[in-house]
Amino acid sequence: TCYMNSILQSLFHLPAFRRIVYEMPTTGNENVDKSIPLNLQRLFFDLQFSDSPLSTEDLTKSFGWGSVETFNQHDSQEFLRVLLENLIEKMKKANLPDAIPNLFRGEIRRYIKCTGVQYETDHKEEFYDISIPIKNLPRLEDSFESYIKPQELNGKNQYKTEQFGLQDAITGEEFLSFPPILFLHLTRFEYNLTSG
C-alpha cells in the first residue's frame, strides 16, 4: 500500500486539507466499516498525535476493500481521484460543496484551430491533477512547455470539420487557472506499441 501511504501522508501535510478533513461532519456513530470520512479523521488524528506506526486497515475497509484489494498495486493518481470524489460528495451533503475543489481544482482550455480555413473549436475543462511529461526534460518549466505545445493535425491526422471536411489544424491546451495546491503526475513510463 505504498502508493496509498504516500498520498495520505502528502494530504496530511497540507494544513488546509487536514482542516477540511477535521471539519467533515461525523458523529462517531457512523458505521466504521463504511465511513471513509470518519476513518480518515481518525487516521489524521493518529498521524498528528501518535508516535507509533499506524495502520490504514480501517480506512481501506471503508473503501470496501478486502485483503486482496489492499495488496493489489493501484495507481496513486487514480486512488487520489477516487478519494477526493468521495470526500467532495460528503462535503456536498454537509453544505460545503466547494471546500475541496477550492484547494485542488484548476481550469484548462482545449482547442483545435484550422490553419487553412476560418474554423476553431474549444472547450473548458476542470482538472484536479496534471500528467506532465518528464522524459528528456530537465526542468519543470520544460515539462509545462511540452504539455502546452500545440500539435499539428495534418496528413492522415487531419481534423474533420462539419463545414469544411478534412483540414490541417493545430490542437493544444492552455491553462486558465491553477489551484492553490497543484498535484503533478509525472509520466515516467511510456507504452511501446511495437514491443508491447
Image: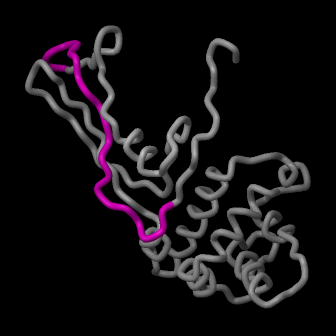
On screen, 151 above or below 25? above
Where, by quadrant of the figure, is residue 47 drawn?
Answer: bottom right
Where, by quadrant of the figure, is residue 168 drawn?
Answer: top left
Q: Position of residue 37 (x, y in %)?
A: 67, 76
Q: Position of residue 50 (x, y in %)?
A: 84, 87
| Left or right of residue 56: residue 107 | left
Which residue is at a point 86% across and 67% down the rendered structure image?
57
User: According to the image, what is the colour scheme of the structure?
Assistant: one colour
Which residue is at a point 75% across and 55% down the rendered structure image?
3
The span picked out in magenta is: 162-182
Q: Position of residue 91 (x, y in %)?
A: 53, 76
How many numbered marks are there? 0
Work out which quarter of the rendered image holds the C terminus and state it. top right
Work out which quarter of the rendered image holds the N terminus and state it. bottom right
Q: Is residue 178 magenta?
A: yes
Closer-to-camera residue (188/68):
188
Closer-to-camera residue (6/158):
6
| Left or right of residue 85: residue 43 | right
Q: Is residue 4 magenta?
A: no
- Outermost residue toward the front in this view: 138
| Left or right of residue 132: residue 13 | right
Q: Position of residue 157 (x, y in %)?
A: 34, 15
- Outermost residue toward the top in this view: 156
Which residue is at a point 25% across and 27% down the rendered structure image?
170
- Outermost residue toward the left in this view: 118
On screen, 131 above or below 13? above
On screen, 37 above or below 75? below
Closer-to-camera residue (133/69):
133
